[in-house]
Image (spheres, rainbow, N blue to C red):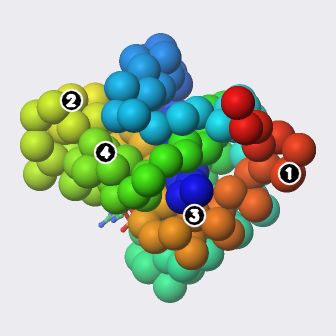
Amino acid sequence: MERTLVLIKPDAMQRDLAGAIIARLEKLGLKLVALKMLHPDKALAQRHYAVHRDKPFYNELVDYISSAPIAACVFEGQGAVETIRKAMGATDPAKAEKGTIRGDFGLSIGENSVHGSDSTATAEAEIKLFFSPDELFGY
Ligand code: DAT
Ligand code: MG
């Protein structure tokens, strides 16, 4: 079954939006199969965002995601990656439609409330970064 990684980013955690965001995602017909709160260190942040290492915003991005605790979730279901990307909205909250998570909660292109894997291959790698196999549940 398809799985995807969602991170509730520091801006959303600091505004007590974790529950609201998870509730929205649960309503999409996807199953929450893993969940934890953690404060990522720089090394984990760098690995998670390695694909962006040559971008001008890379250091800022790594500093941001490791600046405070986040909630990491794995959702499972048919088309989970695409379903969650749609619910998240565009990367820049100013361009994200109302009703999407970033459109409703995002503050700026960096502080955009959520991360979601962008393909099934990325999802598999990202899930392994944040969870061990015994932290993923079937129920
Ligand atoms: P997404 O998170 O929608 O997959 P991405 O993978 O292109 O977007 O970028 C990863 C994160 O990097 C994004 O959530 C916020 C940040 N980011 C992207 N473009 C940026 C930019 N032009 N300036 C600052 N931060 C940016
Ligand atoms: Mg991305």
Q: Is residue 111 visible?
A: no
* Mark earlier in primary sequence (4, 3): 4
Q: Nearer the viewer, mark 2 or mark 3?
A: 3
Q: Residue at x 78, y 49 (%)?
A: 131
Q: Residue at x 49, y 47 (%)?
A: 77
Q: Residue at x 55, y 46 (%)?
A: 76
* Classed neighbour count for the residue bearing mark 2: other residues with Cα under 10 Å, few (<14), some (14–19), many (≥20): some
Q: Is 106 on the left or on the right of 20, as rendered?
A: left
Q: Quadrant of residue 121?
A: bottom right
Q: Which residue is mark 1?
A: 132
| Vertical placement of residue 19 versus 60, above or below | above
Could you say whether the residue bearing mark 1 is in a helix, strand or loop? loop
Q: Which residue is mark 3?
A: 123
> Considering the image in quadrants, where does the C terminus appear?
top right
In this view, the residue in front, 31 or 50, is 31
Mark 2 to mark 1 CA distance (whole Å): 32 Å
- Percent x, y of residue 83: 33, 50
Image quarter where ligand 1 lies: bottom left
Q: Is 8 on the left or on the right of 85, as rendered?
A: right
Q: Which residue is mark 4?
A: 88
Could you say whether the residue bearing mark 3 is in a helix, strand or loop? helix
Could you say whether the residue bearing mark 2 is in a helix, strand or loop? helix
Which amino acid type is marked by label 2? Asp
Q: Quadrant of residue 73?
A: top right
- Percent x, y of residue 66: 65, 46
* Mark earlier in primary sequence (2, 1): 2
Q: Which residue is mark 2?
A: 104
Could you say whether the residue bearing mark 4 is in a helix, strand or loop? helix
